[in-house]
Amino acid sequence: MISPIRQKKRRKKRGSDRSGVRAKGAMRLLLPLSVLWLAAPAAALEGESRPDGVARKTVPYSGDNGRLFREEGVWNYSTMLLREDLGLLLLGAREVIYALDLNQIANKNASVRWEAPMEKQQECKNKGRDLRTECKNYIRILHTMDDGKMYVCGTNAFDPECDVMSYSDGTLSLENRKHDGKGMCPFNPFQSYSSIMADGDLYSATSMNFLGSEPVIMRSTSSSSPSASIRTEFKSSWLNEPNFISMEQMPESQDSGEGDDDKVYVFFSESAVEYDCVRRPVVSRVARICKGDLGGQRTLQKKWTSFLKARVDCPVLESQLPFVIQDTYLWCDSGKHWRSCLFYAVFTPQPESSGVSAVCAYRVSDISAVFSKGKYKTPVTVETSFVKWVMYSGDIPSPRPGACIDNEARKQGINQTLDLPDRTLQFIKDRPLMDQAVRPIDERPLLVWRGAMFTRVIANEVEAEDGKKYHVMFIGTEEGTLVKAVNYDGEMFIIEEVQLFPTPEPIKVLKFSDVTGQLYAGSEYGVVQIPLATCGRSTSCMDCVLARDPYCGWDKTTNKCVAVSQARGKCIQSAKQGDATLCPASGPVKLVDQSVWPGGNLKLRCPPPSNLAVTSWRWGSLPLPSSPRLQVLEDGLLILNASASDAGRYSCLSLEQTRAKGYTTTVANYQVSVAAGSGRGEQTSLQAQRGGPSVAGLQAAVGILMVLLAVLLGWNLYKGHLPLPWRCGGKETAEKNCAGSTETGQETRREGSPLVSQVDNGSNHKSPGENVSAASLQYIDDESTI
């Protein structure tokens, strides 16, 4: 039940939508006014950023959906490292690290426990943390080192610690080279963080203290102390209550005519400093740092001299508040230049916003251009004593603030960041924010989805039978489902949504292996291995083609829907158009006989073959419209109060529209007959039962009972125990029998009580047609008994 306060707020919100925002004070107006301009680009996209519909198929949880690994008593399987060279999936959970077979994760090759010492757990508890959940060691960092060993860090009961781990002869072991992990690994196991290992250095984005109030983006060697690190400034203009999402490095020095340096990109969200309002909105950011950055000589000592950040937009029409980034995935074509790389990112709405998620794609070249050519924002103090951020229009120092050391800088005698002049360093210290935002490809989202909120994303490129390559996205949700969608030249088609876990657990990590061609999804509950191609779910050529899955095609040799890479010959596939006319003609659908008593009810099942299909019914050759007595349901047809005129052939047809055309198929055929007999008698018998057995079964039970009573009565009369029972009430025994009969009648018939419909959605039915009790659909209004 919604509380009166919430109801009042909702009415108030609806009223404001109709008549405009009514002021309650100037400060309350600042938030919507400050973000209103963010909605302007989205308004121009009306009709283009609305939800793209539903998945063609919704697959409930089944053990066949993927291979599951979990161990009883172990939780939080959220850190993964693919060691394809060893054939292993390294999996970090709470207090344990696993080495699983990459091809079959149900096979555990080895494991090692890493628990927080009891004294650490007690200290954590004394500081107000939960001993059973927070004061444990959650594995948060797993990276491959240059020597093939693994670098691993854990929260260690709010005292992060790192170690080196090795795998040899089927044994996973920690080398007891532990050192302080502050600034590398988060204190809080439930706090967002990110890290990568590059050229022996660990780049991490986390918090430096117990309270999580000192965010930092830091570089350190895997064995160094924090004092030798390079990090961000502790200033709100640099990082303001951030939630770190991901990190990636880009080899921008390759084939660079400017002698540029490699970059590290960091995605996060934070409270926006540039908005003048009481409650600052959360915005999405991308930051960039140069790998060769050594800090400044006097200004910005041991601090990044190349730290720049910019807003990341994913305009969705539903909300004026900007959507918040949740995950990114870097996709690059190995045969092309790094400038062709793409970042796929998932976004979710802020609280009290619309209930949709979105996926946007960004070119790395566009992001790089914002930092290398864009203008800066600068803080300005105004009379009302707050700071306003505006575009900087003054002179830009040389070398350009935040730029990496390149050929132009070297011409000025600046060969490393320690040589940068203080004017350049002071500029970037005060103005790390870019004025221009990073915009998605085509200025709109690739996919807008109304359903479970997105959490993780992975993209893969696949070549279809037509020779063209398409990008397929696999998106995890907060309810433990995996959404599979493909981009057909701007048209997003959602192939399926699959439930991966028995309980709706958020997917916390997604990894893809090029070697196995498998996906690996981790959650609090466990980890699941999923194939990219799930062709076996289609049992006919038409269903296989209409699925429009570029991984799958109909093998004419085996008459099965198979992965294109495993087909014996050329497959039937029409991924872009969904042209099912390529399929050979299918045989007639089997005719199923069904019968019903006069006055009885019958349900003919016809579940739609997909979420995009629309079903209809025909009686003989005529369309069958829905009526009070013939009710067309989502999964079938319900015939009420059957009569002889209802006999005949019923056909269920399915219509599914694709780019090519609409396809109509016959899903089910029924031959319905109405049994001969007194309709009134059978109807009365149906009314006398409530959700009980069928009429025939009840009649058989009554017959057996009558035979037994007759035998018992004859035996007692033969022995002289009873006089002839002409009427009820002659003897005490007869009275008891009458009383029992009356009690039975009351149990069977409850006058005037409504009976609940027993019509099911068909998910658990094994027979294509069902007799439905008339008592389940009406009131008993007579005195008849069985």
Image (cartoon, helix red, strand yellow):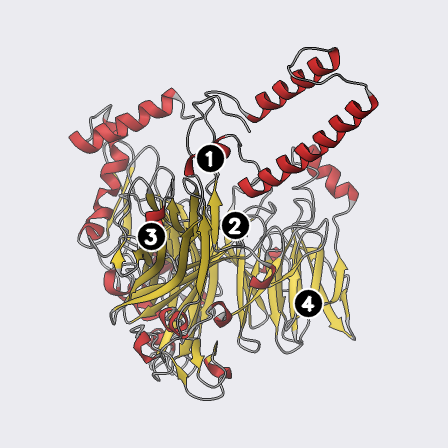
Placement of the N terminus among the 4 image quadrants: top left
Q: Which residue type carries mark 2?
A: Ser
Instruction: Compare residues 591 and 95 and report the one nearer the observer.
Output: 591
Q: CA distance from mark 1 to mark 4?
A: 66 Å
Mark 1, Cα crowd under 10 Å, few <14 / some 14-19 / many 20+, is few
Mark 3, Cα crowd under 10 Å, few <14 / some 14-19 / many 20+, is many
Q: Position of residue 132 (x, y in %)?
A: 70, 39
**Disc 3 or 4, which lies upstream in sequence?**
4
Kindly check if marks 4 and 2 are in contact, taking CB atoms under 8 A apart as contact: no
Residue drawn 38% across the image and 72% down it: 542
**Disc 3 or 2, which lies upstream in sequence?**
2
Q: Foreground mark, 1 or 3?
A: 1
Kindly check if marks 1 and 4 are in contact, taking CB atoms under 8 A apart as contact: no
Q: Foreground mark, 4 or 2?
A: 4
**Would you name the residue on which mark 4 appears?**
100
**Disc 2 or 1, which lies upstream in sequence?**
2
What is the secondary structure assignment of the residue under circle 1? helix
Mark 4, Cα crowd under 10 Å, few <14 / some 14-19 / many 20+, is many
Q: CA distance from mark 3 to mark 4?
A: 47 Å
Q: Which residue type carries mark 3?
A: Arg
Q: Is residue 333 above or below residue 369?
A: below
Q: Foreground mark, 2 or 1?
A: 1
Placement of the C terminus among the 4 image quadrants: top right
Kindly check if marks 3 and 2 are in contact, taking CB atoms under 8 A apart as contact: no
Q: CA distance from mark 3 to mark 2?
A: 25 Å
What is the secondary structure assignment of the residue under circle 4? strand
**Would you name the residue on which mark 3 appears?**
431
**Disc 1 or 4, which lies upstream in sequence?**
4
> Which residue is farthest bottom?
569
Q: Foreground mark, 3 or 4?
A: 4
**Would you name the residue on which mark 1 appears?**
681
**Disc 4 or 2, which lies upstream in sequence?**
4
